[in-house]
Image (spheres, rainbow, N blue to C red):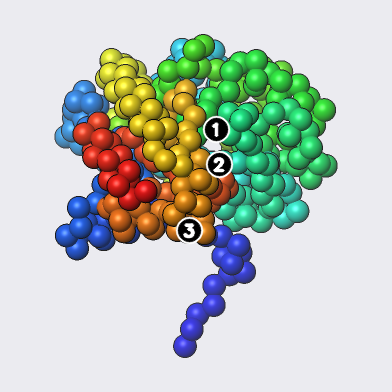
Amino acid sequence: MSVSVSARMTRVRPSATGAVLALAARLKAEGRDIISLGAGEPDFDTPKHIRRAACEAIEAGATRYTPIDGTAELKAAVRRKFQRDNGLDFDPDQILVSSGGKQSLFNLCIALLDAGDEAVVPAPYWVSYPDMVRLAGAEAVIVPTTFEDGFKLTPERLQAALTSKTRLLFINSPSNPTGACYTRQELTALGDTLAGYPDVVVVSDDIYEHIFWGAEPFTSFASACPALGDRCVTVNGVSKAYAMTGWRIGYAGGPSELIRAMQTVQSQSTSNACSVSQVAAQAALDGDQSAVSEMCDAYHQRHDYLISALNDLPGFECRAGDGSFYAFPRVDEAIAALGLVDDTELMKHLLDAANVACVPGAAFGAPGHVRMSFACSTDELETAVGRIRKAL
């Protein structure tokens, strides 16, 4: 007997990054010397003061249910973070703590979108955006950006994508997978375009905010476009900046009625985020930030090495990024030179011939590219580049 799944599942794909990581792990277990550049995960340990806070919380008995939307202490820390870093002021009922930034985004899609609605997703995009939209029953409108434009959505391309059905726009800055970051001026221009579309909500995914080395200060969309603040949801978390991926804490700030609906979704799915992780996240947001700067400096150095090294490879062309820990080289010429069909075949070739795992650009809506994470040591990066050169 076979069990049929829901029709919506025919429109949704498993995470491509998860599939590559699982494959790399399986090959390692079989004895292959795999270097994985697929993971979007810091290679640093969670800072000691954060770990200590979690241990103390366990000993103090902070192991029970919390309010669905997060503890009052963590929400206060999130509020201070938004004020300190972004100039945004949210009341407690405008903040929701979830089990990771991904859940915050998923909650939003379910709470906001209906069948027939459209969500604008600039490509290259983080792999989960379109499928979250599809799981909510809406349509993902993919808007390509170009290598030459720095992989950034322009007002003209946004204008062409907006319709009476548009309900949501995704902004991810710094970007996964490209490392591109919007300037305040660029965000203001997008906000001006949205002024005539009052039904469109903007979600600003700022998860890489503190992994940033751009020429001007980081600016969140709601900070650049305060007139649109009543229809902007700002999502962030502790996973990337504090090397806390496994702790699973994300948070969102936005209009109270939308946050309330997102909380209702969460109440019927996961309920509260992990109680001990919430204490750790409070320590991260309120505590010593020096480790964040030190990790960012390390990523910046790795970035500078890898971008230069990739541009020296035959058939590779890579833009420098302003943040995150990814390189996103254009590899059309390498694909053609090897007689391959596409970036997925190139990924398989690099895995087979070089024992290097990366993620094909098609998974991010940008065929002809590959994503490489530099959240690993410089020694590993140097070895990986040498292997790739031989494989090419």
Which is more toward the observer, 315 or 345?
A: 315
Q: Tag 2 or tag 1, which sits nearer the N-term?
A: 2
- Amino acid identity at mark 2: Tyr
Q: Residues within 10 Å of mark 1 (few under 14, many from 20)?
A: many
Which is more toward the observer, 353 or 28?
A: 353
- Amino acid identity at mark 3: Leu
Distance from label 1 to label 3 (Cα)? 31 Å
Residue displayed at 76% across by 30% down: 156
Apparent side of residue 27 relative to residue 226 in the rendered image (left or right): left
The image's mark for residue 340 is 3
Percent across and percent down for residue 99 are 41, 42
Distance from label 1 to label 2 (Cα)? 8 Å
- Amino acid identity at mark 1: Asn
Quadrant of the rendered image containing residue 245: top left
Q: Residues within 10 Å of mark 2 (few under 14, many from 20)?
A: many
Find numbered disc 3 in the image and state the secondary structure of the residue it sits on: loop
The image's mark for residue 125 is 2
Q: Residue furthest bottom?
A: 1
